[in-house]
Image (cartoon, rainbow, N blue to C red):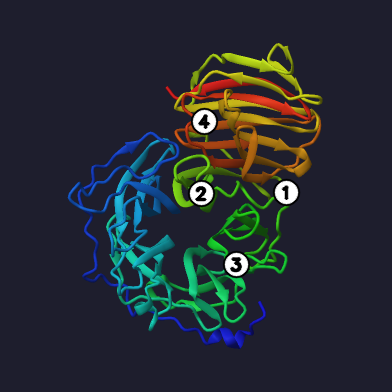
Amino acid sequence: MDLKQKLIIGLLFCVVLSCSNDDDTFIQPPVNTTIQTNIYPKPPSGWFGETNTYSTTGWVGDVMPYFDNDKFYLYFLHDALSKPEGKGFHDIHSFQTSNFTEFDYEGRMIPYGETYEPDFGVGTGSVIKVGNTYYFYYTGHNGIPLFLQSNPRESVLCATSSDLKNWTKVDDFKLTAPMGYLGYDFRDPHVFYNEEDGKYWMLMSTQTEPGRKAVVLLFTTDNPATNNWTVQSPVYTTTAQENYLMMECADMFKMGSYWYLIFSENWSDYKGTRYRMATSPNGPWITPEVDRFDGEYLYAAKTASNGNTRFLFGWTARKVPETNTGNKEWAGNMVIHQLVQNANGTLSVKQPESVSSLFNNSITIEEESSVGNVTKSNNALTLDGLTSKAMVTYAKLNKSSQITFTFSMQSKGDSGLLLNYVSETNTSFKIAFEPDNKRIAAYNVIEGNDQYVNQIPFQFVEGEEYHLNIITNEDMCVVYINDQLAFSNRLYGTIGKKWGIYANTGKVVFSNITLKSIN
């Protein structure tokens, strides 16, 4: 960073003298706890009742995962479908799970504040345990003009708990942007204990002021209970080539001999959750050749480990209106990927094994039609689209389906998978393998015309085999490629629609095609 250390020393933050309980304890209303057998959960319908204008019916925003007591506590920003006029937004709710196939909805954990309070809007944070106390550091957001006359828009707030369920806001704790950084964008505290440094670290997403350069800023303390958080230099500053506006929801962890920094950015041409790697938490940070885990529809993903395996928790955006041609909107369904460390230190993602085991009902694949040059040999289909499009379509999909196949290109060209296929109007949702563009892309096909939706970089090699695992679940679609990358999309209307495979301008082989559902 260009700012000098002497400028950083003049930090402007407020700390609490003690983190004692006060009268701001949130009393959880009775919750009809529901177990959802849904691999991509969202909040169930309103548990406050019909007489209250607030309803839990809504969506999952930024996930703040924490593992304890042999289960994952998945706190998230709740985006209500119906927001009462004059009330706040994005209060923190929670799921609990031990297997990623059943989710125990726990309701509201931390409510939003009043119009005059810093957490009228609640933002992302993280949980850490010190002694017998859990500390939840989260973002307070209030953009009301009257509030902004004497306060920054964003700050870090704190709540404490002894059981991870009942949280007490600490009214006299407030951490604001230090000198040289922008209080308008100062959010997403991520706190962890850094054994190599012997201190607790807090990562903050913010910008320099002046200059508006995106940074992941570092604060440290010997003990969160003392609230003596001291500002340090940024752990990462966006490069001139990247030029990210913000690096949101930062996360840092060590796996093997490497440290990893994860963040999300939503303003470049290729939005999404990204990562950097280093041999030290202080860098220098290496940018992998492919630095995203998924396409832009997965956002704000953060990680948590059960001590053996680390998982990535994010959300896949919904659309408004709820059609395949609707606009991408903030918040959606929770999506969970399993992280895998490769031999060279880079990271891959795959479907959690517990989710894979759900699809144990094999379904006979019924061919509907075949068009163009298609050759069948045992369990393989060769689609030759070099001169004209080749395509095979199959019968309708169920509510939750898993399609798997092995795929190889004999000659490069456009090919891939069709979902929501309607032959009469030549309409579908297309997942295209595009070797010339070095990517996998998603399109809405409307009467034969492609409308771009999403993409993830991927380098196809002619003659090499790739294994694909495609999950459709209600209005979600997640594709895993070689247990290496994921490609999540919002896809409405899949149930009862045909699907298929195609080759256009290329010659490809699809083999070992299987279709399974959840019993």
Earlier sequence position, callout 3 versus callout 1: 3
Q: CA distance from mark 3 to mark 1?
A: 30 Å
* Residue 157 image position (x, y, % from top left): 38, 70
Q: Is residue 99 visible?
A: yes
Q: Is 186 left or right of 82, judged from the image as shown?
A: right
The amino acid pointed to by label 4 is Ser
Name the residue tied to disc 4.
Answer: 356
Q: CA distance from mark 3 to mark 2?
A: 22 Å
Pair 3/4: label in front: 3
Are discs 1 and 2 less than 8 Å apart at CB? no
Q: Residues within 10 Å of mark 2 (few under 14, many from 20)?
A: some
Earlier sequence position, callout 3 versus callout 2: 3
The amino acid pointed to by label 1 is Asn
Of helix, strand and loop, which one carries label 2? strand
* Residue 159 image position (x, y, % from top left): 33, 66
Question: What is the number of the mark on residue 245?
Answer: 3
Name the residue tied to disc 2.
Answer: 327
Quadrant location of residue 508?
top right
Q: Residues within 10 Å of mark 4 (few under 14, many from 20)?
A: some
Q: CA distance from mark 1 to mark 4?
A: 26 Å
Of helix, strand and loop, which one carries label 3? loop
Earlier sequence position, callout 4 versus callout 2: 2
| Front residue of 205 and 383 | 383
